[in-house]
Image: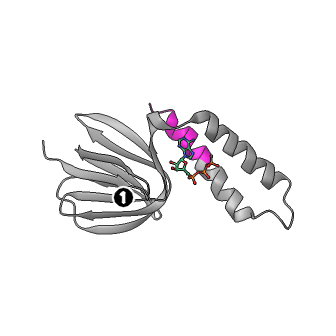
Amino acid sequence: MATLHLDVVTPDRTVVSAEAEMVVCAGVLGEFGVLPNHVSLLSALKIGALRYRVNGKDEYVFVSGGFADVNNNLVTVLAESAEMAADIDTARAEAAKRRAEERLAHRDEKVDATRADAALHRAVMRLNVATHR
Ligand code: ATP
């Protein structure tokens, strides 16, 4: 079966380097799927899940936004942070979720609500992606 190469890279490490039959990304304008021989594209990503298929099985990855570049059967995702579903520490994500909710519930001039919103969103999406392991 035709495949494309997927790299998911953060400033610390390469999280995924795989031959995939399909990749589905959470683009800022909506989810988009990439099959072999897709046209070139560059898209900003939302905080969310990336899904890719290997031998008919879907793998899920949390991605904290960033960019996806599709070119010549190579999908490169650059993100500030990313984890395979199996590597997500759910206790840590639960704690991050509680912390963000607490900040948003007791907001005053010291609370950066945009930052707390983004932290909450990352935590919720990590918990969501972690269900796919
Ligand atoms: P926290 O408040 O728990 O640090 P965060 O959303 O602020 O969460 P990030 O800034 O997105 O964390 O990530 C910092 C580093 O920690 C990255 O390397 C990321 O992969 C890792 N990381 C964060 N949360 C988790 C988690 N729940 N499980 C595994 N790795 C995580």
Q: Is residue 16 above or below residue 73?
A: above
Quadrant for residue 76, please give it. bottom left
Residue 10 coordinates in the image, percent (x, y) = 42, 56
The residue located at (30%, 53%) in the rendering is 7
On screen, residue 75 versus residue 112, left or right, reads left
- Helix or strand or loop: what does disc 1 sit on? strand
* Count of picture labels: 1
The residue located at (80%, 62%) in the rendering is 111
From the image, give the main secondary structure of the stretch colored magenta: helix
On screen, residue 110 versus residue 47, left or right, reads right
Residue 85 coordinates in the image, percent (x, y) = 45, 37
The residue located at (87%, 63%) in the rendering is 108
Per the image, the residue denoted by label 1 is 77
Q: Is residue 99 above or below residue 56?
A: below
Residue 67 coordinates in the image, percent (x, y) = 41, 64
Q: Which residues are magenta?
A: 123-133
Q: Is residue 128 magenta?
A: yes
Question: Mark 1: is the Cβ under 8 angstroms from ligand 1?
Answer: no
User: Which one is in front, 95 or 1?
Assistant: 95
The residue located at (51%, 32%) in the rendering is 131
Q: Residue furthest front?
A: 12
On screen, residue 71 versus residue 114, left or right, reads left
Q: Name the quadrant of the N terminus.
A: top left
Q: Is residue 2 above or below residue 10?
A: above
Quadrant for residue 60, please give it. top left
Residue type highlighted by circle 1: Val
